[in-house]
Amino acid sequence: MDGKKRNIIIADSNETRAQELQTLLTGAYNVIMVSDGEQLLKKVADYFKRLSAIILDADIPKISAEKVMDALRNKKITKYVPVLVMADRTSELTKMYYDKGAAAFLRPPYNTRSAKAKVDNVVNTYAERKWLEKKVIQQNRELTYQADMLRKLNDNILDMIGTIIEFRGIEDNNHIRRVKEYTLILGEAVATFFKEYQLDSEQVNYIASASSMHDIGKLLIPDSIVLKAGKLTADEFDIIKSHTTKGCEMLEAVSRYQEEVYYRYSYEICRYHHERYDGSGYPEGLTGDEIPISAQIVSVTEAFDALMCDTVYRKAVGFDRACEMIVEGECGTFSPKLIQCFKVSQDKLKKIAVEYQG
């Protein structure tokens, strides 16, 4: 057979009619003839990946046309290969075959130009649909690849900025990394236990990456204040608190270079990670779930890690004492839901604390 021609199966027990159809279609197709339902299903299995259409006699013997259609539909063959049913159309018959996945009907006489045109139209329509589906799949793969590359670029940018903050001496060497890992752990617990926040693993990863931005605004605070060893004056503390809004100004300046979801989470975390559930935080004094969940998660993980680090303000406390202070609200009030997630995550948090010591 000519490999360049498209394969088409004619399943018809009427030999004369089948030969007429074969003559009509042979110029454009490799025609495969079968005379009953059993032969048809076998040939479909043999030719499925190289099959352009099936022409099915509604009165085919051995396995009925209805059962043949059920078998083809169950194997999802009708999704990719059009089936044209040879029968006089009635409303009841039409609905039944269309429900079973038929693409079209061929009505007598079957040896005319209009019958050939009907077959060609159906075959070409399915071929175009297959081509479009392949293009969509290919484009989706390309978009996914581009999104992955952009995500990696954003991750690298966030890590680089976090490293700059650490090198400046504002934070201990592994503070940014630990907060990121703690955020991933706590975020996964929130996603598992509190579905109302509508977080999934992808969003949790975004939030964890964006957590690197929580203190970016401190780059705009003078060293004389941010690295001051003694107690801050009220005015100095007000300047320190401005790192939340100053950081957002920095993010806005580079927003066009960031993926939208990264920018949103980075902005939320930067601005609101010092808010507290009871409204005692800053810069806006938000309460409860007015605080974005991304910022709520990072407020816990950042405060938790700060307790275990020596800073210009205080000496570090141990892991157990830090956990106790978070749970008891000694660092400000956190959401009861987050405290519950924090409690069940302590073993995982401890592993990170040990792995990434200062």
Image (cartoon, rainbow, N blue to C red):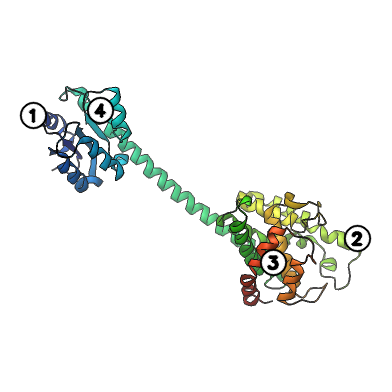
Q: Which mark is residue 105?
A: 4
Residue assigned mark 3: 164
In this rendering, is residue 154 above or below 225? above
On the rendered image, what quadrant is the N terminus found in?
A: top left
Measured Cα–Cα span from mark 3 to mark 1: 84 Å
Residue assigned mark 2: 235
Label 3 vs label 1, nearer the camera: 1
Relative depth, front residue between 187 and 267: 187
In this rendering, is residue 17 above or below 6? above
Q: Residues within 10 Å of mark 3 (few under 14, many from 20)?
A: some
Q: Earlier in the sequence, mark 3 or mark 2?
A: 3
Q: Earlier in the sequence, mark 3 or mark 1?
A: 1
Mark 1 is on which residue type?
Answer: Thr
Q: Which mark is residue 16?
A: 1
Q: Earlier in the sequence, mark 4 or mark 1?
A: 1
In this rendering, is residue 198 above or below 230? above
Residue at position x 83%, y 56% in the image: 280
The kind of secondary structure element at disc 2 is helix
On the rendered image, what quadrant is the C terminus found in?
A: bottom right
Q: Is residue 143 left or right of residue 12?
A: right
Residue at position x 69%, y 58% in the image: 337
Measured Cα–Cα span from mark 2 to mark 4: 84 Å
Image coordinates for residue 191, horizontal then vertical, percent: 60, 57
Mark 3 is on which residue type?
Answer: Ile
Q: Is residue 129 left or right of residue 187?
A: left
Mark 2 is on which residue type?
Answer: Asp
Measured Cα–Cα span from mark 1 to mark 2: 100 Å
Relative depth, front residue between 98 and 24: 98
Assess whether mark 4 and mark 2 are in contact (beta carbons under 8 angstroms).
no
Mark 4 is on which residue type?
Answer: Phe
